[in-house]
Structures are given as structure tokens and as C-alpha cells.
Amino acid sequence: MQEENWSYTIRSHHAFSFRSLKEVWQYRDLLFKFVKRDIVTNYKQTILGPLWFFIQPILTTLMFIIVFNRVAKLSTDEIPPVLFYLSGVTAWNYFSECLTKTSTTFKDNAYIFGKVYFPRLILPLSVIVSTLLKFLIQFGLFLAILVYYILTDSFHLTPGLPILLVPVLLLMMAGIALGSGMIITSLTTKYRDLSFLIQFGVQLLMYATPVIYPLSTVINSKYSILILANPMTPIIETFRVAFLGKGIFDWMHLGYSFLAMLVLLIAGFYFFSNTEKTFTDTV
């Protein structure tokens, strides 16, 4: 009997196998194609196109200023409201969009998964990368407004050590969103209700994160445990301290967020790897 020589063999492997990561690297060209697809299709056939990168954070910031600063009289820690809310919105938008999009990976791409093989992990990773580009554009808007305030003597900035942690903060936001998203998308293959809950849940989570209020106003309240238990709280607060010089910076809180990120990534990778083997039977 003649032996068959295959150039590539697909085998099931352990959930924590490094082969999955090796395959992602081998398929990196496909990863960049998915990133391009995400960016192009997002604003395709829209009238304003890429201007939505700027319109969304500007309108959200204006709404927060009117509702939470002017009407509700919430403190902004003596930071100009525009800078306070825009810094929170910019960081939060990156996390929430990564989480929302990665949490529907299996449902949104079932038609591709059923036809051709490629490392499934590429799709949630492409969301993280394409959303990072959107974050950088909105971050540029925030920096431009910050520079305007500094040049017009409307705000005095004292740069501190936390500004060196910004790449780590980005990594942590991406890791928490990716880990949580992979867990949720794995569960939604069996429990579709979660796909309806995620949008609502992300909005609720924002109110448990110091996006619209400074952490200093709630640190001594009875809700402080709930807010500090949220791993996004130290990240948003440190992001604000890094660029605006005011807020609460605590290495222990940040270490807690980093540990939470590792746990979520390991759990997410485990659930995702196990689900990708059988999801075609359930989706």
C-alpha cells in the first residue's frame, strides 16, 4: 500500500499547547487581512467614513459633560471636564469595543469556520489589533486637546512615572478584553442569551469604573469594594494619572488588575480552544 505524503496535517491538540500560538504566527498574513477587513468594512458605505473615529468620542464627552458635570454636579478632580471625560472615554472605548466584538467571534464567523481551516484564535486577535488602530486615532485627538489646554495655560500638567506605564496599560486592557471575550464567545455557542447580555453588561460595567467620576470620590464609600474589585478601575485611573497628573495611583491595585488579566487570558484560551473543536455541532 502506497504511503500518502501530506504537506500539512491538522490534528487536535491540547488546549494549552504552544502549537496554537505557533500557528497564529504562521498565519500572520491572514491576521493582517482580517485587520484590514475589520477597518474597511466598519465604515464602508457610510457618509462620514473615518470621521466617526472623532465624532463618537466627542459626542460622548459632550454628553457626559452636560449630564454628569453640569446637571449631576459630579467632581472631575479639578481637571477640565473635557480632558477628564475624554481621557476616560478614550481608554474605555478601546476596552469595551474589544470585549464586545471578541465576545461574538464564533457566532459572527460561523460561516467561515465551517468551510476552511485556519487558527481560530486569529479572529479575536485581529479585533484587538484593528481596535488598537482606532484607539490610537482617538488618543491623538485627546493629546491634541491636552496640548491646546497646556499652551493656553488652561491646565498645568506635571508628568509623572505612570506615563511610562501606558504601553502596559494598553496591554492589560487588551488582555482583559480578549480573555473575557473568549470566555463569553465560547459560552454563547450553547447559551445564546449571553449575546444579548453582553451589550447591556458592558454599559453597566462602565458605571462601576471611574470613567464618569474620579476614584477619589468613591474610595471611602460603601461601594468602594465593588469598584476596586473591577480590574478596569486601576487601569483607567492610572491612565488618567499618567496624562493629567491627578487621581489615585497604587501599585497593589495595578498588580491586582495584571493578575486578573492573566487569569482571564488563561481561562479564555482554555475555553476557546476546547470550544473550537466542537462548536460546528452546536452553532
Image (cartoon, grey):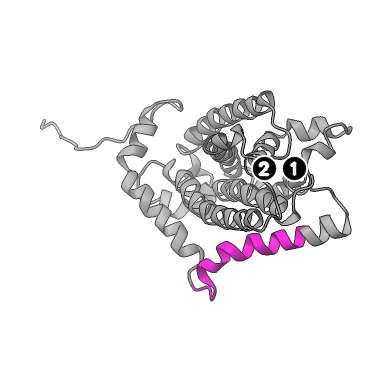
Judging depth in this view, the residue of 145 and 262 nearest the camera is: 145
How far separated are the C-alphas under marks 1 and 2? 10 Å
Secondary structure, mark 1, is loop
Question: Where in the figure is residue 46, as x and y percent of width and height?
Answer: 53, 73
The quadrant where residue 159 appears: top right
Secondary structure, mark 2, is helix
Q: Residue at x 65, y 29 (%)?
A: 254
Q: Residue 10: which disc?
A: none
Q: Residue at x 72, y 40 (%)?
A: 246
Q: Which residue is mark 1?
A: 210
| Quadrant into which the N terminus falls | top left
Question: Where in the figure is residue 156, as x and y percent of width and height?
Answer: 69, 47
* Apparent side of residue 45 relative to residue 92 in the rendered image (left or right): left
Question: Where in the figure is residue 208, as x and y percent of width and height?
Answer: 77, 41
- Magenta: main secondary structure equals helix
Q: Earlier in the sequence, mark 1 or mark 2?
A: 1
Label 1 or label 2, whichever lies nearer to me, is 2
Figure disc tally: 2
Residue 267 in the magenta stretch? The answer is no
Name the amino acid type tagged 1.
Pro
Q: Residues within 10 Å of mark 2 (few under 14, many from 20)?
A: many
Question: Where in the figure is residue 26, as x and y percent of width and height?
Answer: 30, 39
Residue 63 in the magenta stretch? The answer is yes
- Which residues make up the magenta segment? 45-64
Q: Mark 1 and mark 2 in contact? Answer it, CB < 8 Å.
A: yes
Up-down relation of residue 193 to residue 238 (above or below): below
Q: Residue at x 76, y 49 (%)?
A: 212
Q: Residue at x 60, y 49 (%)?
A: 100
Q: Which residue is mark 2?
A: 240
The answer, for residue 39, to whether it is visible in the render is yes
The quadrant where residue 227 appears: top right
